[in-house]
Image: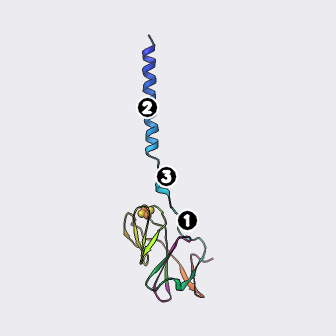
Amino acid sequence: MNGPFAQRRTVLKGVALAGVAGAGVAGCSTESKLGHAENPTPTAAVELGAADDIPVGGAKLFREQRLVVSCPARGEYKAFSAQCTHAGCLLEKLEGTVGDCPCHGSKFDVTTGEAIHGPATVPLPEVPVTAEGGKLIAGPRA
Ligand code: FES
């Protein structure tokens, strides 16, 4: 007389386990982590090449160094982290002085760091930059 009861319990246990496994799969996605930069700003000074490469009134993206540099006036430079303040993706391209994040569509004014289109709301952190001997050097000095 034990047979039917034992069978029923087994079935219920199986359903419960399937439910837990299903929730685990649905809640786990690595997609949002793609393209994220690991370090937001340089931890030591980095050379970015010729200062003249930045057009006056324009900007240039240095993806490898995770920086964006603008030139508001001849001989004046401003650098910001090129890592989006929303979830950390690296800005992909510039349209003039507007930097685009490929992950969720945020846009930044790279002359001020300001987030001009969400979801990001926090400005890009400014990074010290100088032009020495015609070369741009960004990041903290020793
Ligand atoms: S990480 Fe840039 S918009 Fe989300």
Residue 16, disc: 2
Indicate the amino acid at tag 1: Asn
Indicate the amino acid at tag 3: Thr
Query: x, y percentage for residue 7?
Result: 45, 19
Name the residue: 45% across, 61% down. 87
Query: x, y percentage for residue 90?
Result: 49, 66
Residue 119, quarter of the rendered image: bottom left
Indicate the amino acid at tag 2: Ala
> Which residue corresponds to mark 3?
30
Name the residue: 60% across, 88% down. 133
Q: Is residue 124 above or below residue 73?
A: above
The numbered mark, 1 or 3, whose residue comes first in the sequence reads 3
Q: How is the image coloured?
A: rainbow
- Which quarter of the image is occupied by the N terminus? top left
Would residue 43 be counted in the magenta stretch?
no
Q: Main secondary structure of the magenta part?
A: strand
Labels 1 and 3 touching (C-beta < 8 A): no
SS for tag 3? loop
